Image (cartoon, helix red, strand yellow):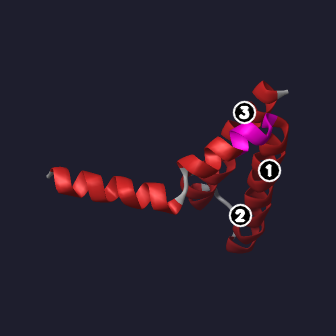
Amino acid sequence: MQNLGLFLIIVSLLPWEAIIFVVPFLPLDLSQKAVLVPILAIVAEVFFWLGLVLAGKEVATKYRRYFSFSRIWKGLKRWRHRR
């Protein structure tokens, strides 16, 4: 189940990439694109959260620690001081 969860988390990135790189260039009306973007965003979120639930608490905790604002901020400060 954990592998399926990780797979769903990775697959959840594809709709976001489609929103950025594919949808603007599709030969659709603006109203059709306006409907397509929220649908893709909802699909991406559902895949992500379903994957997180299937992956388990340990993966969710690691993900939360890895993408915490304080960790990112400290890493940026360290990177800036190296230069």
Q: Are marks 2 and 1 in contact (CB under 8 Å)?
A: no
Mark-to-mark CA distance, 2 and 1 = 18 Å
Q: Which residue is mark 1?
A: 49
Residue 22 vertical position relative to residue 33 in the rendered view, above or below: above
* Type of amino acid at the residue the image marks with label 3: Leu
| Boundaries of the magenta span | 55-60
Q: Is residue 77 magenta?
A: no
Which numbered disc covers residue 6? 3
Q: Are marks 3 and 2 in contact (CB under 8 Å)?
A: no
* Image quarter (top left, top right, bottom left or bottom right) of the N terminus: top right
Is any part of residue 12 visible from this angle?
no
Q: Counting residues from the N terminus, which is met first, the one under dot 3 or under dot 2?
A: 3
Along the viewing direction, whichever of 40 and 8 lies nearer the viewer: 8
Q: Residue at x 29, y 59 (%)?
A: 77
Q: From the viewer's perspective, is the residue at label 2 or at label 1 nearer?
A: 1
Along the viewing direction, whichever of 7 and 71 lies nearer the viewer: 71
Q: Main secondary structure of the magenta part?
A: helix
Q: Residue at x 58, y 49 (%)?
A: 65
For label 3, the crowd category at 10 Å Cα-Cα, with few meaning under 14, some 14 to 19 and many 20 or more, is many
Mark-to-mark CA distance, 1 and 3 = 11 Å
Q: Residue at x 82, y 52 (%)?
A: 46
For label 1, the crowd category at 10 Å Cα-Cα, with few meaning under 14, some 14 to 19 and many 20 or more, is some
Q: Counting residues from the N terminus, which is met first, the one under dot 1 or under dot 3?
A: 3
Q: Which residue is mark 2?
A: 37
Along the viewing direction, whichever of 14 and 28 lies nearer the viewer: 14
Instruction: State the residue lying farthest toward the bottom.
Output: 31
